[in-house]
Amino acid sequence: SAYKVAPSAAVWRSATSFYPGTLIYHRQGQESRLRMEWEFSPDDRDFGRTVACFQGQIVLSCADVELVTPRHNCTQIELDGICPGLDLANPETILRTSRPSNTFSSVEASSMDSVCCACGGGRKSSVFSEMICVNSDTKLDSAPELFIAPQTTVMEAPCKTYVLGDPPTEETRCSTPVVRAPCRPPFYCETEELVSTAIGYPRRIRETSSIASVQEVKILNGGFGCTTGGTLSAGPTGGFGFGFHATFEIAGAGTFRGISGAITGITIEDPGAGYRFPPEITVSSGGEGCQGYSFQAVISQVGFHVIDIWPGVGLDIEIVAGDNSFDPLSSITALDSISAKMPRATLLAPVSFAGFMTRRLVWKPLRSLSGAVPISICFGAEDSSGVISPRGNVLSFNKTSSACIGIRVVRCQYALGEGETLQHVAAYYQTNWLQIWATNPQLQNPDIELKQGTVAIFGHLYEVEEGGTIEKITRKFGTTTTSIMNLNNDVAVNSLDVVGTGQELCVIPNSCFTNV
């Protein structure tokens, strides 16, 4: 920053403290005026608040004196040639300072030898400006932080009031869940209808959940007898995980890559997702003649911030980046291909305000994605802290940060969109509105128009028992394999006969045809 001290022949700093930095002087035109710049580049030792005080000083010369009525009787006047031509024979001659301006309010004196008494009783006067103090607060220039303004689920009417506790107090509880849109920039969203805890204010992205994928496949035994390469796949472990795909090569005669006909190299094409345990790796195609091989899968955990969404209203969130006020943001981007992972999703252009940058992400997932493994999308933010030399060389780069969210489509629930009714939901899932109404006791009157975002349960969550199979489950609930696949994406993408003990499935029972 630049601070002007004028007129000035010197700049004094308070002697009570040490202040880092450099003072640079610039004389302006022909005026007796200086502009002082204070440059301060802090290091690790300079964190915290600092107060630097500056003061301008005028040292008097002939230009600063005038003849006035005498204040002192002096027997001898010695100016040491400072003011040649001044008539000292006149006893009424005296020197008085001409004050530079009204801003110079204090006059101090500094001791000097051989100065006439008329100049202040044997002292030479100096005039000082008012002191200017500058507060500086040195903070760590950290990388940007990423936040999310999520959709929220609030409980609305019907409500009941209960008398609870000792001493007894009244408490009102409502029973209809409704999905509401997040708070929008500039994030002033409190209303009479919503308490602050129910509003989708931005909150820091915390990657506390994980999605496991296959990071590496170790060749424990390359086997023998292979005449061609091929592909590898991994079945779900306990019903969890899907999507792994890899290719393998074999050692040929004279290639010095191992025993001829053995599997020697594996390239992972798709690491898959959702594995809770290392899956079993098998040859799915090719590999003619291969015998005696064995592999070991190594899974990695990718952290993410889980977001639950519902078919119907879908996804509608704000991804927000924030940084220091002195370090503006330059970008916020998706690090994954949203179009590949979330077809028909829209990531809107960034909006900047008050030191923040935000982007809105909107997506209507297919109803068939209910129960899918969470979709991981990572975002990155970049600030403007980089330094470029006058020649254009990059001396330091902008700071960046990243964080990931995992979008999970809730199983067995539907949030009504604008104009939708229970009849629509029943048609979507090939059931009837009476069964849905019976499953949602909080919806007391099926004929009233339901609010947009109202969550309706259309099926039952069933935890697979030990030894359970798709065939057994379809017979037990009088349903079909196609129905279970449509309601449970994690089953649809895997082998139909593989489900794990404890795995959660959505089923719509047909009470007329159950066979327990």
Image (cartoon, rainbow, N blue to C red):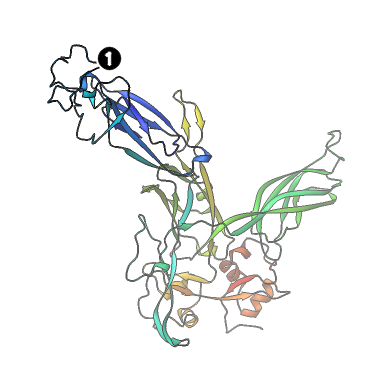
Name the residue: 44% across, 49% down.
322
Tell me the quarter of the image containing the N terminus.
top left
Q: Is residue 340 visible?
A: no
The front one of 511 and 161 is 161
How many marks on residues? 1
Mark 1: give few (<14), some (14-19) or many (20+) Cα within 10 Å.
Answer: few
Q: Is residue 196 above or below residue 117?
A: below
Q: Which residue is identified by label 1?
A: 80
Q: Position of residue 371 (x, y in %)?
A: 57, 65
Tell me: 26 left or right of 50: left
Q: Position of residue 53 (x, y in %)?
A: 36, 38
The front one of 355 and 110 is 110
Tell me the quarter of the image containing the C terminus.
bottom right
The front one of 46 and 378 is 46
Name the residue: 75% across, 46% down.
230
Q: Position of residue 178 (x, y in %)?
A: 42, 71
Q: Secondary structure at mark 1?
A: loop
Which of the 4 quarters of the picture holds residue 425?
Answer: bottom left
Name the residue: 48% across, 50% down.
145
Which of the 4 quarters of the picture holds residue 103?
Answer: top left
Which of the 4 quarters of the picture holds residue 507?
Answer: bottom right
Tell me: 78 left or right of 444: left
Query: Which amino acid is tagged 1?
Result: Asp
Q: Is residue 231 visible?
A: yes
Q: Is residue 193 above or below residue 51?
A: below
- Seen as rendered, the residue at the extreme front is 75
The front one of 153 and 483 is 153
Q: Is residue 117 above or below residue 244?
A: above
